[in-house]
């Protein structure tokens, strides 16, 4: 608790009983109708633990309670009629005159004297401390006719307070806080706690000598904001500020400072404050924010490389990390191949684009344990020339695992920091642990997508092959049909027109039937597409398709030419070719 607030709270607690009584007294002024009426004067005061005494203007005691008698070790009869001022002067010679003077000032407008504290000497010669409140007693016309004093012994309280001085209490409290307690005036630091040296890494003497020296440790990105607030701190009742500092060892700490301006009347104003190290809380908040950002970014990524870039972007947000790359492990060869990188020179990327499974770097990563250079990993010393050329001052190698297997490597570094801070290491390892499942999922999705694409390409190719086969088959069948019609049917027709024996005619009939079966493919397609066609119309259509004239068809089918013309009209009607200039033979050939 603030020492000033603590002091005020203590004083308020001490004075509350008397202030309460003073308030009561103002509303119920003691009456002086019968100041000698002891019973009326006593009311309920006889048995109060406070010392109560009522006396006239000349100091003659009119009433005392039992506590008053016990304190002064005298009976009621001995005290009533005595001079109150003489008794008090005998027991408190250092303060009675001042108290009597304050009583003479009481009137209708000022009914109570200020609470006073006096040192008294009891009957046995021991020094005690008392606290008194004096009230004026008025008659019915409002004229002061006497006084009533209420006091209490505070010797024990003051003895306990005297065990420690205020300076000792303040020093013990300030020196044992885990925060930096400080007090300053407009021009200098009046006090700063010893924890300042632990948090800032600087001596308190340097701050006493130059109060503005702490601004030199403030992070450059926060310095202007901090300077602006501290310039106006004496104009603000309270200040609440968070900022970063850079210690002499290069590490960064987050500071939360709170201060309040104390005005002291005639004294110079003071600013009192507490500064706490909140680095751990800030690191935890940063890690939660990075995990959230990583989940959102990776959730919108569709490709593995895109997801790796998101992971690398998050890693580069860590304090001091300004470059890095992510390697993917070939499950068959164990080779590490650079899949994503940022902040590295082309020369370094070329040299470090891959690690064979036999290299020390790959073997170190496959152990599954994080490695840091230059503080811990001697293996990375083998990369010394490349690291020196790149001007890297710190490197971290964090294996990315999934189901116990190393599937990737998060490799980041700094061109400015001499090492990787502990908080940053913890954050990087957390990111790597979270990344393992992400990378595995995205790689599986990409492989599935690739297999789906291959399957789709295979299906497409198969469809093309089947279509080509059908076309070749149709072309082959078409060739056979054409050959039969050009090379076989003319001779059959000649045989049919000649004289044949019954056996020959029967053989010719069987041969013609077999050939019709071979050429029935077109007939089948035509009848399927046009079920209204009669068998005779289908035969006529087949001959028309072959380019036969109506006369030739009539001869082949033993029908009249007029009948063939009738069938031709029916065929055009059923094929919906009436009133068109479409050639019937060409149309029939287009059906296949």
Image (cartoon, rainbow, N blue to C red):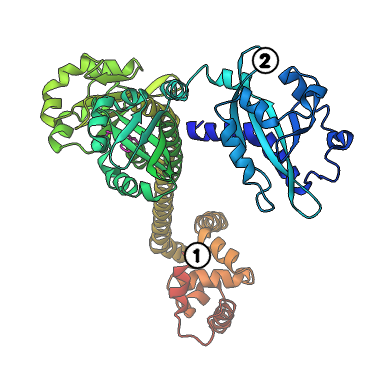
- Residue 52: x %, y % from top left: 75, 31
- Residue 110: x %, y % from top left: 65, 49
> Among all residues in the image, which is located at the extreme top?
124
Question: Is 524 located above or below residue 262 in the figure?
Answer: below
> Among all residues in the image, which is located at the extreme bottom?
579
Which class describes the residues within 10 Å of circle 1: few (<14), some (14-19), or many (20+)? some
Quarter of the figure with residue 318? top left
Task: Identify the residue shown where x is 74% and y is 51%.
Answer: 143
Disc tally is 2
Disc 1 to disc 2, C-alpha distance: 169 Å
Quarter of the figure with residue 420? top left
Q: Is residue 107 magenta?
A: no
- Along the horizontal axis of the image, is 65 left or right of 309? right
The boundaries of the magenta stretch are 315-321
Q: Which residue is mark 1?
A: 496
Q: Which residue is mark 2?
A: 123
Which class describes the residues within 10 Å of circle 2: few (<14), some (14-19), or many (20+)? few
Q: 112 or 250: which is nearer to us?
A: 112
Quarter of the figure with residue 209? top left
Task: Identify the residue shown where x is 22% and y is 29%.
Answer: 417
Front: mark 1 or 2? 2
- Along the horizontal axis of the image, is 109 left or right of 160? right
Task: Identify the residue shown where x is 59% and y is 31%.
Answer: 96
Question: Is 331 located above or below residue 573 in the figure?
Answer: above
Q: 589 or 224: which is nearer to us?
A: 224
Q: 219 or 402: which is nearer to us?
A: 219
Q: Is residue 318 magenta?
A: yes
Q: Secondary structure at mark 1?
A: helix
Q: 362 or 179: which is nearer to us?
A: 179
Question: Is 524 located above or below residue 79 in the figure?
Answer: below
Q: Which mark is residue 539?
A: none
């Amino acid at each position: 608790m603030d020492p000033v607030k603590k002091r005020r709270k203590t004083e308020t607690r001490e004075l509350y009983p008397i202030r309460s009584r003073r308030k009561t007294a103002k509303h119920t002024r003691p009456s002086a109708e019968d100041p000698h009426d002891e019973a009326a004067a006593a009311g309920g005061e006889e048995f109060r633990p406070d010392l109560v005494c009522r006396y006239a203007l000349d100091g003659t005691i009119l009433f005392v309670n039992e506590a008053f008698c016990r304190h002064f070790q005298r009976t009621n009869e001995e005290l009533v009629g005595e001079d109150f001022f003489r008794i008090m002067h005998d027991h408190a010679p250092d303060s009675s005159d001042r108290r009597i003077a304050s009583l003479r000032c009481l009137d209708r407008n000022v009914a109570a004297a200020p609470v006073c504290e006096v040192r008294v000497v009891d009957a046995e010669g021991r020094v005690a401390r008392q606290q008194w409140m004096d009230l004026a007693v008025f008659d019915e016309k409002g004229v002061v006719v006497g006084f009533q004093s209420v006091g209490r012994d505070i010797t024990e309280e003051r003895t306990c307070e005297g065990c420690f001085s205020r300076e000792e209490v303040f020093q013990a409290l300030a020196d044992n806080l885990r925060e930096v307690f400080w007090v300053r005036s407009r021009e200098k630091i009046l006090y700063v706690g010893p924890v300042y040296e632990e948090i800032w890494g600087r001596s308190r003497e340097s701050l006493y000598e130059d109060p503005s020296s702490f601004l030199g440790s403030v992070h450059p990105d926060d310095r202007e904001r901090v300077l602006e607030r501290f310039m106006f701190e004496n104009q603000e009742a309270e200040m609440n500020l968070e900022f970063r500092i850079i210690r002499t060892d290069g590490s960064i700490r987050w500071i939360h400072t709170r201060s309040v301006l104390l005005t002291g009347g005639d004294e110079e104003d003071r600013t009192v404050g507490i500064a706490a190290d909140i680095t751990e809380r800030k690191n935890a908040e940063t890690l939660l924010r990075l995990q959230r950002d990583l989940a959102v970014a990776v959730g919108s990524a569709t490709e593995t490389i895109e997801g790796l870039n998101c992971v690398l972007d998050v890693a580069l947000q860590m304090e001091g990390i300004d470059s890095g790359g992510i390697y993917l492990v070939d499950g068959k060869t164990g080779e590490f191949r650079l899949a994503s990188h940022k902040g590295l020179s082309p020369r370094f990327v070329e040299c470090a684009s891959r690690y064979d499974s036999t290299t020390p770097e790959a073997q170190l990563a496959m152990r599954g344990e994080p490695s840091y250079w230059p503080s811990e990993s001697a293996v990375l010393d083998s990369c010394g020339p490349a690291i020196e050329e790149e001007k890297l001052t710190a490197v971290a190698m964090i294996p990315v695992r999934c189901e116990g297997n190393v599937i990737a490597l998060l490799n980041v570094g700094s061109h400015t920091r001499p090492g990787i801070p502990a908080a940053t290491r913890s954050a990087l390892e957390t990111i790597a642990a979270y990344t393992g499942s992400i990378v595995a999922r995205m790689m599986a999705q990409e492989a599935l997508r690739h297999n789906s694409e291959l399957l789709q390409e295979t299906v497409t190719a198969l469809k093309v092959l089947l279509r080509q086969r059908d076309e070749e088959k149709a072309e082959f069948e078409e060739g056979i049909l054409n050959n039969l019609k050009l090379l076989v049917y003319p001779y059959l027709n000649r045989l049919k027109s000649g004289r044949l024996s019954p056996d020959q005619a029967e053989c010719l009939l069987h041969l013609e039937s077999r050939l019709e079966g071979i050429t029935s493919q077109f007939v089948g397609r035509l009848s399927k597409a046009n079920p209204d066609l009669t068998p005779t119309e289908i035969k006529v259509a087949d001959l028309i398709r072959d380019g036969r004239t109506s006369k030739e068809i009539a001869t082949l089918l033993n029908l009249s030419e007029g009948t063939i013309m009738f069938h031709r009209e029916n065929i055009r009607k059923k094929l919906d070719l009436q009133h068109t200039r479409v050639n019937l033979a060409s149309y029939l050939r287009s059906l296949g």
